[in-house]
Image: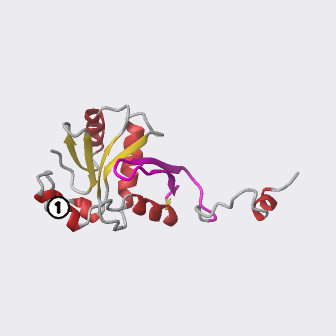
Amino acid sequence: MVSLCLLVLLGVVPARTDVPIGTSGTQYRLRFFHTHTGEHLDIVYRVGETYLPAALDQLDHFLRDHRTGEIRHYDPRVFDLLHDLTAKVGEPDGEINVVCGYRTPWSNEFLRTHGHGVALHSLHMQAMAIDIRLPGVPTATLRDAALDMHRGGVGYYRASNFVHVYVGRVRRW
């Protein structure tokens, strides 16, 4: 019988470089579809209490400002919130549709001045907020679950069919 180590050395089985040696525990996975770029991402971003730096870099790239391509490091608590939110609504393996991730100040001002109801000091610019929907889950259900978690702000945009969540001060609109 051929050992797993030999198969890795021969390149038959890829080495797992995303999980630091000695890291164990529950894997925290998220699945995304970005509505503006058409990209998909299925990623384990945390194992136990250890965030995986390479995975966080991939998430930062995925959630970049789709208008400018600029990237900002996301607060990992956003990912924990999304992980727990999908579990709370009974869709732990659901693919989250991202309507908006990070926004540069330029993109934020562009949207704000063109009547999109964007806040002047939006936490999208701090990479602490995200606008989402979860196919198969009504946005009102997603909103209620996020509010019930008391982990930050929750905005509900029924007409546009998405929920805005952020980590920080608990509030709603």
**Where does the image place residue 94, in percent across and percent down from the top left?**
44, 39
**Where does the image place residue 99, in percent across and percent down from the top left?**
30, 48
Looking at this view, is 11 or 150 the one in front? 11
Location of the C terminus by quadrant is top left
Looking at this view, is 31 or 110 the one in front? 110
Q: Quadrant of residue 12?
A: bottom right
Q: Is residue 40 left or right of 7 when viewed as pictured?
A: left
Q: Quadrant of residue 112?
A: bottom left
Using the image, determine if residue 9 lies above or below residue 173: below
Instruction: Residue 147: tell me if it is visible.
Output: no
Label 1: which secondary element: helix
Q: Is residue 134 left or right of 26 when viewed as pictured?
A: left
Q: Is residue 14 left or right of 163 when viewed as pictured?
A: right
Q: Residues within 10 Å of mark 1 (few under 14, many from 20)?
A: few
Q: Is residue 30 magenta?
A: yes
**Where does the image place residue 69, in percent across and percent down from the top left?**
35, 65
Q: Residue at x 12, y 55 (%)?
A: 114
Q: Residue furthest right?
A: 1
Q: Amino acid at mark 1?
A: Phe
Q: Which residues are magenta?
A: 21-49
Q: Residue at x 25, y 57 (%)?
A: 168
Residue wearing tag 1 = 110
Q: Residue at x 44, y 51 (%)?
A: 39
Q: Residue at x 27, y 62 (%)?
A: 103
Using the image, determine if residue 84 lies above or below residue 51: above
**Where does the image place residue 158, in percent across and percent down from the top left?**
20, 37
Q: Is residue 156 magenta?
A: no
